Amino acid sequence: MDELLDLKQLCSQIRRDILRMVHAVSSGHPGGSLGCTEFFVALYSKILEYDPSNFTMDGNGEDVFFLSNGHISPVWYATLARHGFFSLDELNTFRKIDSRLQGHPTTAEGLPGVRMASGSLGQGLSVAIGTALAKKLNGDDRTVFSLHGDGELQEGQIWEAAMSAAHLKVDNLIATIDFNNRQIDGDVSDVMSLGDLKAKWESFGWMTMAMEGNDLDQVIKTLQHARSLTGREKPIVIIMETEMGQGVDFMMGTHKWHGVAPNDEQLESALGQLEETLGDY
């Protein structure tokens, strides 16, 4: 129970990091970042096996994670910094000229933790599948994880990749869909409905699971269970329901904070709703 409390406190702190990062440069994507905080905390605190002090691009002998919906980079950067990949001070450089912390993750700057440039939606699943196949060829028994936005599933490449993963029996891959029903232009169901996602992924040959993405305990247990089901000749997808803007009352229930930074007054209000638990960077 104490460990779960500690992780919930980390969630609060990372949400503060996200808000302060995007506010400082009046740019960024707070909505989806806030909604996925529990997922990132669970993944890096309880699920992935990795060595932050010895990061390599190939990830041999380690679990590997790919962020496909790269616009939610603030939550990833804050999580990486809070887990020792680079210093917290570097969060001050978010979206600034020559920073390694670009608005969408890149690889040219050599930021520890990042193995794929992302931002052009639809590509991350293909990369994850390729990496998972490489691990099989190398006799590496670690697992590949990826995260995707629900709006991203409107990209055709996702479904080509999904079909190939099932055909090739890529059973060391766990993909998660951030299903918040929001994208930049409105509700996903209005822009282009995704239909029955569970049935759709199952029809493509995937093992499907579901979880409440803002329930930290459930996220941890579901990811742990998913890992226990690897190696059964099927890729795994988790449909994760979240609330965009989770933790900040005026950011929830709308798509409007997909890519808008809070002003000074809004930042003060938002931070007032989130406990500073580990110290702001």
Image (cartoon, rainbow, N blue to C red):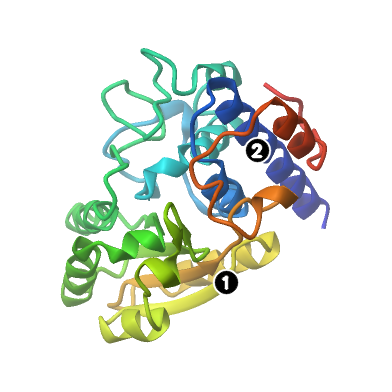
| Residue 275 % position (x, y) | 82, 38
- Determine whether, in the image, residue 150 is placed left or right of residue 241: left
Residue 226 in the image: above or below residue 9 = below
Question: Is residue 74 at all visible to an observer of this figure?
Answer: yes
Q: Residue at x 29, y 51 (%)?
A: 121
Residue 167 coordinates in the image, percent (x, y) = 16, 76
The amino acid type of the residue labelled 1 equals Met
State yes or no: discs 1 and 2 in contact (Cβ < 8 Å): no
The residue located at (62%, 53%) in the rendering is 38
Q: Secondary structure at mark 2?
A: helix
Q: Residue at x 49, y 34 (%)?
A: 28
Q: Report the amino acid beneath label 2.
A: Ile
| Badge 1: residue crowd in 10 Å (few <14, some 14–19, many ≥20) | many
Q: Please tell me which residue is depicted at 67% across the width and 21% down the height of the picture.
A: 281
Residue most extreme to the top? 98
- Left/right of residue 54 with respect to residue 83 in the rendered view: left
The N terminus lies in quadrant: bottom right
Q: In the rendered image of this protein, does residue 21 appear above or below residue 209? A: above
Picture quarter containing residue 191?
A: bottom left
**Tally of marks:** 2
* Label 2 Cα neighbours within 10 Å, binned few <14 / some 14-19 / many ≥20: many
Q: Which residue is mark 2?
A: 14
Distance of label 1 from label 2 (alpha carbons): 21 Å
Q: Nearer the viewer, residue 6 or 91?
A: 91
Sequence-earlier tag: 1 or 2: 2
Mark 1: which secondary structure? Answer: strand
Frontmost residue, 253 versus 271: 253
Instruction: Give the percent coordinates (x, y) of residue 123.
Output: 24, 52
What label sits on residue 130 in the rendered view? none
One can see residue 65 in this view: no
Percent position of residue 31, x then y? 56, 47
Q: Which mark is residue 211?
A: 1
